[in-house]
Image (cartoon, rainbow, N blue to C red):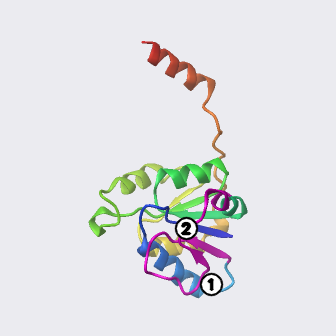
C-alpha cells in the first residue's frame, strides 16, 4: 500500500492532486491518503483528513512506501519503520509553507538510501511509476547511540 501523508498543520493540495491524478491512471494501485485540512477531495483514492496516532502508525506499518511532504517528522517515521519514502517539498513561493526549509531538507537528503525526492508534480509521478525499484530505507534506531549520549553528557557537563 502507498500511504500518502501531508501532516496535520496545513494542506498540500499540489501533492494530493498529483497523487490523485497518478491514481486515476493506475486504478489497481493500493493508495491511501491523509490529506489534512483542505477543501480538495481526491476522486481516485480513499482518504481521510486526519487520523489518530495509532491509526497513523498502523498505516505506516502496512505500507510498502510513504509519500509525504519534506517534513522531518514524516522522514523520521519512514526511517523508524524501515519504509522507503518519496518526499515532495512544500514551497514558500507558493504559500505552501512559511519559507523554503523543505526545499533545503529535500536537497540535503536526495542521495540517502530509501529517500526519493520529487521536486514537482512531474517528478512525483515518475517516482510513483518507479516504486518497485525503491530500495528499503535503513531502519532508524529508536534510541540514541551510547556515543551520542556520552558526547551530550560531556557537552552539558562543560
Image mark count:
2
Please identify, in this view, whether the residue under mark 1 or under mark 2 is nearer the observer: 2
Q: Residue at x 42, y 51 (%)?
A: 105
Residue 9, image x, y percentages: 43, 61
Residue 85, image x, y percentages: 58, 59
Q: Is residue 149 magenta?
A: no
* 94 lies above or below 28: above
* 18 lies above or below 57: below
- As drawn, is 10 to the left or to the right of 79? left
| Residue 113 seen in the current view | no
Which region of the structure is painted magenta? 30-57
The secondary element bearing badge 1 is classed as loop
- Which residue is tagged 1? 26
Residue 44, image x, y percentages: 58, 85
* 91 lies above or below 137: below
| Residue 84 seen in the current view | yes
Looking at the rendered image, the quarter that the N terminus falls into is: bottom right
Badge 1: few (under 14), some or many (20 or more) residues near its Cα, within 10 Å?
few
- The residue most toward the front is 52
Alpha-carbon span between mark 1 and mark 2: 24 Å
Q: Is residue 52 magenta?
A: yes
- As drawn, is 136 to the left or to the right of 7? right
Q: Residue at x 46, y 13 (%)?
A: 157
Residue 155, image x, y percentages: 45, 18
The secondary element bearing badge 2 is classed as loop
Looking at the rendered image, the quarter that the C terminus falls into is: top left
- Which residue is tagged 2? 50
- Predominant SS of the magenta segment: loop
Q: Toward which corner of the image does residue 84 lie, by quadrant? A: bottom right
Amino acid at each position: 500500500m502507498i500511504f500518502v501523508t501531508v501532516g496535520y498543520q496545513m494542506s498540500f493540495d499540489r501533492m494530493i492532486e498529483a497523487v490523485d491524478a497518478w491514481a486515476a491512471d493506475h486504478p489497481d494501485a493500493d493508495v491511501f491518503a491523509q490529506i489534512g485540512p483542505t477543501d480538495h477531495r481526491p476522486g481516485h483514492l480513499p482518504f481521510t483528513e486526519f487520523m489518530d496516532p495509532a491509526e497513523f502508525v498502523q498505516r505506516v506499518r502496512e505500507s510498502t512506501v510513504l509519500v509525504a511532504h519534506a517534513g522531518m517528522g514524516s522522514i523520521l517515521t519512514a526511517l523508524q519503520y524501515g519504509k522507503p519514502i518519496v518526499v515532495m517539498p512544500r514551497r514558500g513561493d507558493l504559500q505552501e509553507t512559511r519559507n523554503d526549509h523543505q526545499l533545503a531538507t529535500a536537497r540535503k537528503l536526495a542521495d540517502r538510501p530509501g529517500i526519493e525526492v520529487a521536486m514537482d508534480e512531474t517528478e512525483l509521478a515518475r517516482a510513483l511509476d518507479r516504486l518497485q525499484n525503491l530500495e528499503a530505507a535503513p531502519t532508524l534506531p529508536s534510541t540514541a547511540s551510547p556515543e551520542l549520549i556520552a558526547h551530550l553528557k560531556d557537552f552539558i557537563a562543560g
